[in-house]
Image (cartoon, rainbow, N blue to C red):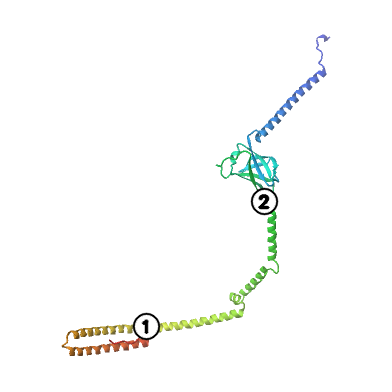
């Protein structure tokens, strides 16, 4: 037989269950604490990432309308968010005051000459943007108030629709059956048909084919007359400038005239010499006078030959000069 006095008593089942519940409770408490710490850490990180713990400065933007602007909206500079809308107020003068908080590290991009705009596109809400053209200007002070410039693309839609309506109205007037454009096109088509006709562009210019035909006949007669004139001009050139024409004969006559004039000049020089001799020698007056008469006869003969030659030239060529030769 087994000795039962040395066997320890069995543990109580209720006490074991209570211990198990205590262990589960401790684990659940630890899990809740870890979850709470995780949530608090996430919240702190989000607040840090959102700049809650950073030093900020306030910027007040004044606009006549704040429709579409909401708290938490970003204000961007060159596409990067540098501020956030904290609240929107209505000023006593009826304008909207948009209070924007800007981090100190990002406030360096805002200057006293900065321009702030609120743009609204066709789709989506408005966007607040900052533009700084001169970064060397003084920094924008804290709690500064600036007027915001509004640009609403949807506001241009009514004016654009009115312009489109006017355009369609004008287009309808242009394409109407009794519109001047249709009349002009019909006239152009008629001109095109005339251009295809026998007289072509001339008939279109004159208005009918009869007048165009008369003009063509007149041009043909003019061409024939010009051809006859050209023939007459060619004959005149041959008679005047040809080998047997008037110009070569006139040139020969002029050469002969030059010779005769040279003879007359030499005769006159002899006369001058005789006159000088007649003035110097008084004793030989009769003989000098006889010589002078002979020389004068020679001169008169030469001048008569010149006169005959000039008459011959005037007969062959109509010179417009006085043919008289004055004797000394």
Closer to us: 43 or 201: 43
Circle 1: element type: helix
Residue 152, given in percent of the width and then of the height, sits at: 67, 50
Residue 308, given in percent of the width and then of the height, sits at: 32, 89
Instruction: Name, please, the residue furthest toward the front.
Output: 92
Residue 292, given in percent of the width and then of the height, sits at: 22, 88
Label 1, label 2: how far apart the Cα atoms are: 92 Å
Closer mark to the observer between disc 1 and disc 2: 2
Quadrant (top left, top right, bottom left, bottom right) of the N terminus: top right
Mark 2 surroundings within 10 Å by alpha-carbon count, few (fewer than 14), some (14 through 19), many (20 or more): few
Residue 199, given in percent of the width and then of the height, sits at: 59, 77
> Residue at image x 43%, y 82%?
234
Q: Which residue is mark 2?
A: 153
> Residue at image x 69%, y 52%?
155
Residue 264 lies left or right of residue 209; in this view the side is left
Tag 1 near tag 2, CB within 8 Å: no
Circle 2: element type: helix
**Location of residue 40 (image quadrant):** top right
């Amino acid at each position: 037989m087994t000795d039962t006095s040395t066997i320890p008593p069995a543990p109580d089942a209720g006490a074991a269950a209570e211990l198990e519940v205590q262990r589960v409770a401790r684990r659940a408490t630890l899990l809740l604490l870890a979850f709470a710490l995780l949530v608090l850490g996430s919240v702190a990180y989000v607040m840090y990432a959102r700049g809650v713990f950073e030093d900020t400065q306030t910027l007040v933007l004044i606009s006549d309308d704040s429709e579409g602007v909401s708290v938490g909206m970003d204000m961007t500079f060159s596409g990067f968010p540098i501020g956030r809308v904290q609240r929107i107020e209505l000023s006593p003068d009826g304008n909207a005051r948009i209070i924007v908080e800007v981090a100190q590290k990002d406030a360096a991009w805002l200057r006293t000459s900065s321009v702030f705009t609120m743009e609204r596109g066709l789709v989506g809400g408005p966007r607040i943007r900052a533009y700084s053209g001169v970064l060397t200007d003084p920094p924008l002070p804290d709690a500064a108030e600036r007027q915001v410039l509004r640009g609403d693309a949807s506001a241009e839609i009514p004016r654009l629709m009115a312009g489109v309506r006017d355009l369609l109205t004008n287009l309808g007037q242009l394409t109407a059956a009794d519109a001047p454009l249709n009349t002009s096109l019909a006239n152009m088509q008629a001109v095109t048909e005339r251009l295809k006709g026998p007289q072509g562009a001339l008939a279109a210019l004159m208005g009918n084919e009869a007048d165009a035909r008369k003009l063509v006949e007149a041009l043909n007669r003019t061409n024939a007359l010009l051809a006859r004139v050209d023939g007459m001009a060619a004959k005149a050139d041959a008679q005047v400038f040809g080998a047997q024409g008037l110009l070569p004969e006139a040139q020969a006559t002029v050469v002969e005239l030059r010779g005769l004039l040279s003879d007359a000049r030499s005769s006159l020089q002899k006369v001058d010499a005789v006159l000088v001799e007649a003035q110097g020698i008084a004793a030989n007056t009769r003989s000098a006078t006889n010589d002078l008469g002979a020389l004068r006869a020679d001169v008169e003969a030469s001048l008569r030959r010149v006169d005959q030659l000039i008459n011959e030239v005037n007969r062959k060529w109509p010179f417009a000069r006085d043919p008289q030769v004055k004797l000394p």
